[in-house]
């Protein structure tokens, strides 16, 4: 993980994360960016459940391009508020979107066109505050947003970057296609015979993937279908601790800066409590060809 | 049924559930709307389907508690697990009959603010943002919001229109600005139900909940409220609605 972040997420990068909305949020990758003291990042996403708030509080972020930043089960993002209202730890630029418009911004980049038209956001003041949205011919034109890197947490992946994801996908496909490169973190690193047995489930072309990190539990406290439930108590604790800048600093010290690796984090977080133990497998698909 | 037999929340959920018609495709959201969806399915709308922007379609609520729409129990048993833009395609085609949207502030014309209190360049409060709220407000055929009835939440005009309702309240505002859907049809609060005139305009008090008065509504609302020709008491939850709501709690 440290190598992947050091190599492919330099200061100033435009980074798409949390693109499946509430599930599969790459917290381990985000925490590594904090440990490496990344600066001037632009974070791109739909809604962000706590991860963007943490990176903002840690001083890693210059701009947020997203539809929503907070804590989905608990409400407001306290670090996001401090940055926008008091410039703590420093000022933050915000490019507001809706979920639909950030998806379109990424599809525009994926298809290599300057913008895509839509009817959404007509009549919304988001048009006034985001310079990348304009109105013409009765439609809103959403400018392309091209991430330097998309970080995706997945159920499984092989060493060549063939990544299998299931459950709702949010805006992960357009983020991966739009990004210059993709980092995959995964619950299971599997043999190519597993991924290639079901090519429809491969999310992105392997040519986009520059790093595969085997990081079980790398999405905690967010849920991973078939592997982990959402750790609601952990989100609640973060919301309470982060109400003040001092409380957030202590939280960051305890859960990110003082921990040597993810395994220590998972054991401290009591991750076994949220491990999924009752499995529901889909029926296999027959790819027979002769 | 005596009045103490249900809570304000039960009543809000029951009123919200009655907005769901049988066969509707509903953009559900979380918390109270989930309960409303469950109550509608078990009473008058057994064929309503729920669409979630994360990329899920369902014909019944999840079997266990959800903190978010992306939690594993909401995926298991879903009718469709897909990308968000596919859910947005249905919304953009006007195929979503009803949406539920939450907000920090609503104004007399049904506009919602979930973005900025004060000047966006130097906000007093930075709220989380639109999420899918603006999309639902603009593109669903009709929508409803539920809110705690407080003067600071029901304001004369919102500082920032994240999710447009009826704009400046002039008739036909939405049509003139190219908004596809019909906009808000109700604001369901802890005290009363506001509704809107056909074709848009200002919210008026349609019904007041048992135990509350028009005076209390006036006192807790940030604009001089207009009343329906006849303001009635909000119909209490039926036994069937209550049992459906209680079984999900």
Image: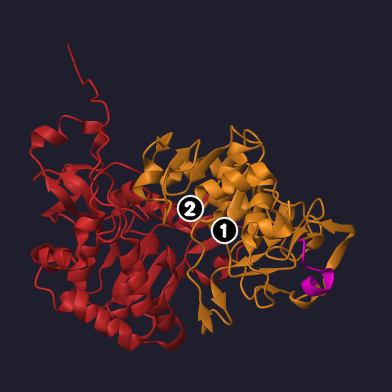
Contact? badges 1 and 2 (CB < 8 Å): yes
Which chain is depicted red?
A
**Percent position of residue A19, x then y:** 34, 55
Which chain is depicted orange?
B
| Left or right placement of residue A239 versus residue A30 in this view | right
* Image quarter of the N terminus of chain A: bottom left
What's drawn in magenta, residue-wise? B209-217
Say if the magenta span includes residue B213.
yes
Please tell me which residue is depicted at 60% across the width and 61% down the height of the picture. Answer: B163
Q: For label 2, count other residues whose C-alpha is less than 10 Å away and answer few (under 14), some (14-19) or many (20+).
A: many
Q: Chain of mark 2?
A: A
Which quadrant of the structure image shows residue B111? bottom right
**Percent position of residue A238, x then y:** 33, 73
Q: Which residue is mark 1?
A: B134
**As drawn, which residue projects farthest toward the top?**
A290
| Residue closer to the observer: A214 or B230 | B230
Q: Chain of mark 1?
A: B
**Applied colour scheme:** by chain
Say if the magenta span includes residue A65.
no
Please tell me which residue is depicted at 77% across the width and 51% down the height of the picture. Answer: B235
- Say whether residue A167 is visible: yes
**Percent position of residue B146, x then y:** 63, 60
Q: Which residue is mark 2?
A: A100
| Residue closer to the observer: A7 or A255 | A255
Give me the disc on residue A199.
Answer: none
Q: CA distance from mark 1 to mark 2?
A: 9 Å
Please tell me which residue is depicted at 34% across the width and 67% down the height of the picture. Answer: A235
**Percent position of residue A103, x then y:** 42, 52
Which quadrant of the structure image shows residue A68? bottom left
């Amino acid at each position: 993980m440290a190598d992947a972040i050091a190599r492919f997420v330099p200061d100033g990068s435009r980074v798409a994360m949390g693109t499946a909305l509430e599930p599969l949020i790459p917290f381990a990758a985000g925490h590594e960016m904090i440990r490496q003291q990344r600066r001037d990042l632009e974070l791109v996403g739909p809604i962000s459940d706590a991860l963007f708030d943490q990176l903002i509080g840690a001083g890693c972020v210059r701009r947020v391009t997203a539809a929503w930043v907070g804590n989905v089960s608990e409400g407001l993002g306290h670090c996001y508020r401090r940055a926008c209202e008091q410039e703590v730890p420093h000022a933050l630029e915000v490019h507001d979107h809706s979920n639909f418009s950030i998806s379109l911004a990424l599809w525009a980049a994926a298809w290599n066109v300057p913008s895509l038209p839509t009817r959404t956001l007509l009549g919304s003041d988001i048009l006034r505050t985001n310079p990348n949205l304009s109105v013409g011919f009765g439609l809103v034109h959403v400018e392309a947003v091209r991430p330097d890197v998309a970080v995706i947490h997945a159920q499984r992946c092989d060493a060549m970057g063939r990544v299998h994801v299931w459950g709702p996908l949010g805006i992960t496909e357009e983020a991966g296609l739009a990004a210059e490169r993709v980092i995959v973190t995964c619950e299971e690193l599997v043999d190519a015979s597993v991924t290639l047995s079901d090519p429809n489930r491969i999310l992105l072309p392997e040519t986009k993937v520059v790093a595969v990190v085997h990081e079980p539990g790398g999405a905690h406290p967010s849920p991973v279908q078939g592997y982990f439930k959402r750790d609601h108590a952990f989100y609640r604790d973060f919301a309470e601790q982060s109400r003040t800048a001092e409380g957030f600093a202590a939280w960051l010290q305890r859960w990110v800066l003082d921990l040597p690796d993810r395994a220590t984090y998972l054991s401290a977080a009591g991750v076994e409590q949220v491990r999924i133990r009752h499995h529901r497998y889909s029926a296999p698909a027959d790819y027979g060809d002769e | 049924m005596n009045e103490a037999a249900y809570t304000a929340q039960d009543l809000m959920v029951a009123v919200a559930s009655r907005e769901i018609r049988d066969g509707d495709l509903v953009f559900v959201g979380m918390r109270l709307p989930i309960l409303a969806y469950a109550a509608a399915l078990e009473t008058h709308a057994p064929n309503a389907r729920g669409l979630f922007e994360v990329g899920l379609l369902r014909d019944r609520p999840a079997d266990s508690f959800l903190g978010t729409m992306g939690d594993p129990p909401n995926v298991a048993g879903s009718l469709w697990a897909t990308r968000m833009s596919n859910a947005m395609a249905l919304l953009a085609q006007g195929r979503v009959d009803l949406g539920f949207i939450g907000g920090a502030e609503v104004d007399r014309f049904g506009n919602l603010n979930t973005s900025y209190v004060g000047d966006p360049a130097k906000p007093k409060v930075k709220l989380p943002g639109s999420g899918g709220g603006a999309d639902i407000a603009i593109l669903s055929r009709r929508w409803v919001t539920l809110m705690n009835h407080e003067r600071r939440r029901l304001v004369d005009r919102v500082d920032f229109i994240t999710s447009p309702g009826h704009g400046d309240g002039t008739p036909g505002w939405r049509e003139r600005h190219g908004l596809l859907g019909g906009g808000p049809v109700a604001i369901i609060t802890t005290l009363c139900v506001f509704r809107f005139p056909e074709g848009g305009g200002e919210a008026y008090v349609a019904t007041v909940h048992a135990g509350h008065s028009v005076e209390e509504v006036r006192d807790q609302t940030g604009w001089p409220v207009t009343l329906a020709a006849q303001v009635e008491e909000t119909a209490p939850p039926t036994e069937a609605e209550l049992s459906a709501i209680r079984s999900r709690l």
